[in-house]
Amino acid sequence: MPQLRSRRSGEGGEGEGGSRQLRSRRTTAGQGKKKGGAGAGEGKNEGGKGSPKPEGRKEGQVAKAKAPPSQGGGNSGKTPVSGDAAKKGAPWSGGPSGKSTPASGGGQKRAAAAKRNTPGAGGSGKKRTYNAGAKNKRSAPGAAAAGRNVNKLERKDTESRDKRNQQNNNQYVNNHKPANNHGGEEEGSTAPVPDKAQVGGSPAYLVEKKLGKGGFGQVYTGRRVNGSESVIDGAHAYKVALKFEHRSSKGCGYGPPYEWSVYSALSGCYGIPRVSYKGRQGDYYIMVMDLLGPSLWDVWNTQNQVMSQEMVACIALESLVILENLHSKGYVHGDVKPENFLLGPPGTPNSNKLYLVDLGLATRWRDTVCNTHIEYDQRPDVFRGTVRYASVHAHLGRNASRRDDLESLAYTLMFLLKGKLPWQGYQGDNKGFLVCKKKMATSAEQMCKYSPPSFKQFTEYVMNLKYDEDPRYSWMISLFEPLCGSALQRPIKINESTLAKVGQKRTRDMLDDQEDEEAPKKKVRIGIPALQWITVYNAHRPMKQRYHYNVTSIRVSQHVEKGNDDGLFISSIACYQELWALIMDAGTGYTEQLYTLSSTFLPKDWIMERWEEGYYITSITGSSVGRSFVVMSKGTPYTQQSYKVSDSFPFKWINKKWKEGFYVTCMGTSNTRWAVVMSRNAGFVDQVVELDFQYPSEGIHRRWDSGFRITSCAATPDQAAFVLSIPRKRPIDETQETLRTSAFPSAHVKEKWGKNLYIASVAYGRTVS
Ligand SMILES: Nc1ncnc2c1ncn2[C@@H]1O[C@H](COP(=O)(O)OP(=O)(O)OP(=O)(O)O)[C@@H](O)[C@H]1O
């Protein structure tokens, strides 16, 4: 899926006249064979016009990029860092434990530019829309202030550990009930509803039987005080449904319920019940709507939790017609599930007609003013919908689009057909995460086993829909039509005229489909999780860069010392099977660097001491058994730093720190734990996060299109996270590529060097579901 974007400047070259490229490639072949007895590998690029030197070749030639001069052993005050760790009795491996392993050149001090660059409060970072109003105050407190804050921030980190479970819980707000406007309705539900209702010029209704209660309100039958029993629907209906919402409920915080505006916008929409009147009476907002019958969940339940294939196929077909109509009005429903599909009232001609209710979570996918698709965004801490039926994108906090309703419909249909979904039964704080993980690990094939092929085709299609892709409703409908039985005996009423129209369109769509078959879409969920190396490459003028992988803890110092002596600093690190990978290069701008290998994730005391000395964390990684490798440097532009270790991706914390002017500057993982480092004066003006249970290809491409570039990445065995930023000062050549490989991509790196693309980030973890 290579992608080429607008051309701007010389690919890999300095100056003008070339290309700005963004590419994302994935290779799974076993490239990059491990070398050497210990399986360690390395590679070097000496910066000579980007032409890589073969491995093992002597270095030192054509070193174009200037590295800070080395002063071997110049400063005895900067003691070997890993020695500190060893002193504290933190032997990170069986090897060098207790031995004072010299870190980064054994306390070498780089003479160049000892003063840290603290540019202060420059560039008011405009935040993402959802941070709107939170202006980034950059206080540029300098080293002393940073030191003071260190303690505070470190204490916070300790506290946050205690709150870990709570945080996990918070990540998925409101597991069972829609999250946005729901909750806090107790006052609404405890206050008695009136005996009689009359609003907005409606006739008077006697409030009778309670039909249901949701997160928003309560629904009752209303019977006209005066009127004819023969009128079954519309403004003069004898019996109606009355939806009461207490004025103090969250949904009514600013006046009438949000849902009212959606009902108004969708007035007359096929399959949406008609609202005849609405208004406020006393403490209640009351909506008078067509009275409907049981929900599909009620039907499934009363039929011994079984539903025939014919019935489910009819439901599929009719739901698709309803959703197509609703989507054509610019809305997505946002909470498609069996409980929200209602049949008409029993004993009436509409008793087997399907309706879709509960528009409280409906949002626009199409902008009202410019008629364009709402912009893509992801906020991993926002969840809207119902855990069991929510799409994976909804779990991950992506803006709702049409594909989400369709994915929820696929889950609804399989639930009705099979009586159970593979992710039922999870409990606890982590429920949302576990359900989403299971959804990602379940292919359409696994989910629809033993069902007619149409269900699998439909499910696979909706799972693969892109954020703004136009769904092919007619093609989907055509999948189910043959399973619906003869027109006269269909268990669900199907609007024949809609079907006829769909039939015409379908012919066109099916032709499109034939064309598509020639180039089948890659399945996003194959049900076989895989972990890979993720490498991110940036264009850079020719410079020295080296990589070392499969490095044991004992060997780290050897590589680091050698690199330091040659003017290189560690720019990124990763861990694979308890062996380290490190990238060293001449392009970091650091003036001094220390590192530690620790038995904890992360070594708080060591970090705090280094903070006091004016170092900032520049790279972190952890091993699956909880060890860590932390690199701290001088010469960064940072003025203040904070980090958080968390059992789940700490997006809430990131969001909070964004508002305080911090940006993510590096991330690392240790098994399923995350560590995120955020710094003030990071040189970014905006930042976003892409988090997924696989490589978030679509999200990254969309962010690239909006001018963001990956600036940090990390992955656990479950999830991969990418932080993308807009730099305050844009580089001339913005080329960025990512690569995913099953082995360390040594051969690829050399190819990239040949194009003046250098590793900017490296991680190992989940990329495939
Ligand atoms: N027009 C109607 N006719 C008959 N019953 C209805 C009607 N509308 C809603 N109901 C019943 O009332 C229940 C609650 O309605 P609804 O889902 O609209 O409320 P809500 O507070 O928005 O719920 P949720 O918490 O799911 O958002 C429904 O599950 C359904 O059983």
Image (cartoon, grey):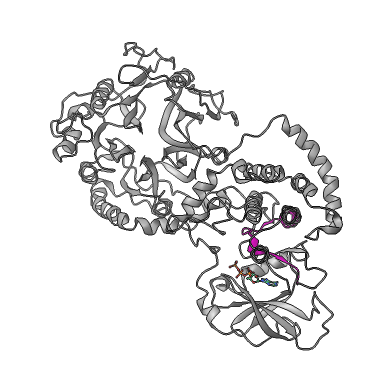
- In this image, 636 relative to 700: left or right? left
Which is more toward the observer, 172 or 380? 172
On the question of residue 393 being in view, the answer is yes
Which quadrant of the picture is home to ligand 1?
Answer: bottom right
Question: Residue 459's x, y, as percent?
Answer: 65, 45
**Residue that appears at 76% across and 44% down:** 475
Q: Quadrant of residue 492?
A: bottom right
Q: Quadrant of residue 652?
A: bottom left
**Compared with residue 32, is residue 155 higher up or lower down, i.e. above or below?**
below
- In this image, 409 relative to 741: left or right? right
Q: Is residue 344 magenta?
A: yes
- In this image, 517 relative to 533: left or right? right
**Compared with residue 538, is residue 430 higher up or lower down, i.e. above or below?**
below
Magenta segment boundaries in residue numbering: 324-345
Question: Residue 762's x, y, as percent?
Answer: 41, 32
The quadrant of the picture occupied by the N terminus is top right
**Compared with residue 41, is residue 425 higher up or lower down, i.e. above or below?**
below
**Compared with residue 202, is residue 258 higher up or lower down, i.e. above or below?**
above
Question: Residue 446's x, y, as percent?
Answer: 59, 42
**Residue that appears at 72% across and 80% down:** 200
The tally of labels here is 0
Which is more toward the observer, 555 or 408? 408
Question: Residue 88's x, y, as percent?
Answer: 15, 41
On the question of residue 620 being in view, the answer is no
Which is more toward the observer, 177 or 585? 177
Q: Is residue 695 magenta?
A: no
- In this image, 450 relative to 640: left or right? right
